[in-house]
Amino acid sequence: MNVHILKGAMAMQRWIDQKVASRAYAETQCEWDKLVIVIKKCSTLPKPILVKLTSEQLLQMLGLNA
C-alpha cells in the first residue's frame, strides 16, 4: 500500500514540476518576443568612436593590421 501512495506522490510532484517548467518557458518566450519587437524598432547604432580607436590600437599592439 505504501508503494501506491509513494507513486501517487511522485506522480503529483512530477506533474507540478512540469507545470512550473512549462509556465516558466511560456513567460520566458513572452519576454523574448517583447525584446525582439523592441530591438526591431530601434535603429542600428553606429560603433562608438572610442571603441573603434581602442580596438585599432590593440590590433596594432598585437601586430595585426586592421
Image (tube, helix red, strand yellow):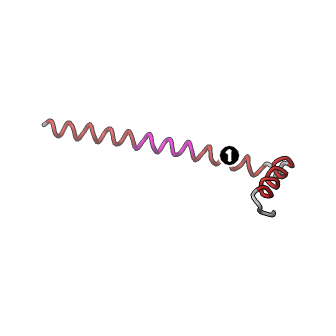
Q: Which residues are magenta?
A: 18-28
Residue 43 in view here: no
Query: What crowding class fits label 1: few (fewer than 14 Cα within 10 Å), some (14-19), or many (20 or more)?
Result: few
Q: Per the image, is 17 magenta?
A: no
Quadrant where the N terminus sits is: top left
Q: Secondary structure at mark 1?
A: helix
Q: Is residue 8 visible?
A: yes
Q: Which residue is rendered at x = 21% and y = 37% of the image?
A: 6
User: Where does residue 8 sit, x and y in percent of width and height?
Assistant: 24, 39
Q: Could you say which is closer to the camera, residue 52 or residue 16?
A: 52
Query: Which secondary structure type mostly characterizes the magenta part of the structure?
Result: helix
Residue that protrudes farthest toward the bottom in the picture: 65
Q: Which residue is tagged 1?
A: 35
Position of the C terminus, as image quadrant, is bottom right
Figure disc tally: 1
Magenta includes 22?
A: yes
Residue at x 84% of width, y 48% of height: 48
* Residue in the foreground of this view, choosing between 54 and 21: 54
In the image, taking residue 46 as reference, residue 25 lies left or right, namely: left
Percent coordinates x, y for residue 17 in the rendering: 39, 40
> What's the amino acid at mark 1?
Leu
Taking the view exactly as shown, the residue that stands out farthest to the left is 1
Q: Is residue 39 left or right of residue 25?
A: right
Residue that appears at 33% across and 38% down: 13
Q: Position of residue 46 (x, y in %)?
A: 84, 52
Horizontal side of 43 relative to 30 (left or right) equals right
